[in-house]
Image (spheres, rainbow, N blue to C red):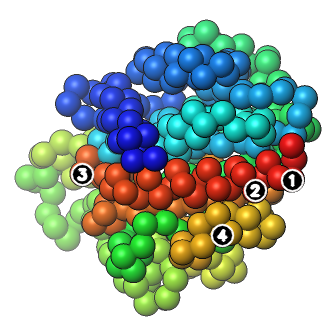
Amino acid sequence: MSALADRVIQCCREIARMSEEPGRTTRTFLSPPMREVHKLLAAWMRNLGMRVRVDAAGNLRGLHGNSTAPRLIIGSHLDTVPEAGAFDGVLGVVLGLALIEANPTISIEVIGFSEEEGVRFVKPFLGSRAFVGDTEWRTSEIDSALRDFGLDPAELPEVRFVKETVGYLEFHIEQGPVLENLNLPLGIVEAIAGQSRFVLYFEGRANHAGTTPMSLRTDALVAASRWICEVDRYARARPGLVATVGSVQVSPNATNVIPGRVRASLDVRHADDNARRGAVRDLLVTDHELVLDQNAVKMDRALTAELAAAAPNARRMTSGAGHDAMIVAPHIPSAMLFLRSPGGISHHPDEFVLSEDVDAALEAGAAFLKRMESKYV
């Protein structure tokens, strides 16, 4: 599999150059570079004899095998965060296509989900949510973006998975340091931590920076800064909890004006939903909007056991990052395989994977497909 592993890595790096920003990888939901990605991967799919389409949510889908036979889904996402690496999401789609090279006898649909990161419209998981029949994320702005991409929002109900689907498998980089610290190439995800995302608003009073005495200021950024420090202190004091303020927008955002308003994000995650909800209650200190409230999700026990048999040396673990699998798992039996992230680096241009780890993932994937074929073919 080593030559195929190198081809997988090369393909991911080629896709990384399909970006909204020259010199760095930024590819958001339905952006023009997504057409380039679809063109590249669709050509590979067609060369493998797969039936290819882009559904009404912008998901790229290729079907190998009989459309009426029991079907396994292999998927991940094609969008990125700003200034991303080359492998987050995309690797899972490319690995799925690489496994089709061996012409497995089970029917497989490989899906490149259109949106997972939540960058363009703040709302994440749009592609996989449409796939499981959830379109409550629709707004007039999103519908307009769908139409601009040549899609018809009225066809969104047709995006949903077909009844012949028997399982979902997602390959993904770990995006953390656990596997590297254990010197292991692969990990098997047993559960994905729940997460809550909010936008908070801090209101002050904008005024002249030179003429307003310090004692008479109502500085929204100072208030937000104190809260940010408290978020960090709070999370560090509670094992298993992670809390992040990753985006801050200051208004009017001028050097010589006291900040009058701050818009800040809050991301809270924990494998225990009660602990996560308790943290949210403690950390919401001002006006806020809920962006995402996602419970912790367990992977399917039987499908995970099949994956463990195919990768017997892989580490069992919980994912702190959210993935499309957490949206799919409540509807379809799901399993997830992690690949080591060297340096624990992700969401960064230095993100990479080792060829030998991709090789190991391909071997595990091929063994998993053999086990599935014995059940469904």
* Residue 174 horizontal/vertical position (percent): 46, 62
Kindly state the secondary structure of the residue where label 4 is placed.
helix
Residue beneath disc 3: 350
Residue type at mark 2 is Arg
* Residue 54 higher or lower than 320, as above or below: above
Badge number at residue 308? 4
* Residue 5 higher or lower than 44, as above or below: below
User: How many C-alpha atoms fall within 10 Å of the one at disc 2: few (<14), some, or many (≥20)?
Assistant: some
- Nearer the observer, disc 1 or disc 3? 1
- Nearer the observer, disc 1 or disc 4? 1
Residue drawn where x is 33% and y is 75% of the image:
229
Residue type at mark 1 is Lys
Q: Are marks 1 and 2 in contact (CB under 8 Å)?
A: yes
* Residue 134 higher or lower than 56, as above or below: below
Residue beneath disc 1: 375
Residue type at mark 4 is Ala
Kindly state the secondary structure of the residue where label 1 is placed.
helix
Instruction: State the CA–CA distance, disc 4 to disc 3.
Output: 30 Å
Instruction: State the CA–CA distance, disc 4 to disc 2.
Output: 11 Å
Instruction: State the CA–CA distance, disc 1 to disc 3.
Output: 40 Å
Badge number at residue 227? none
Badge number at residue 371? 2
Quarter of the figure with residue 75: top right
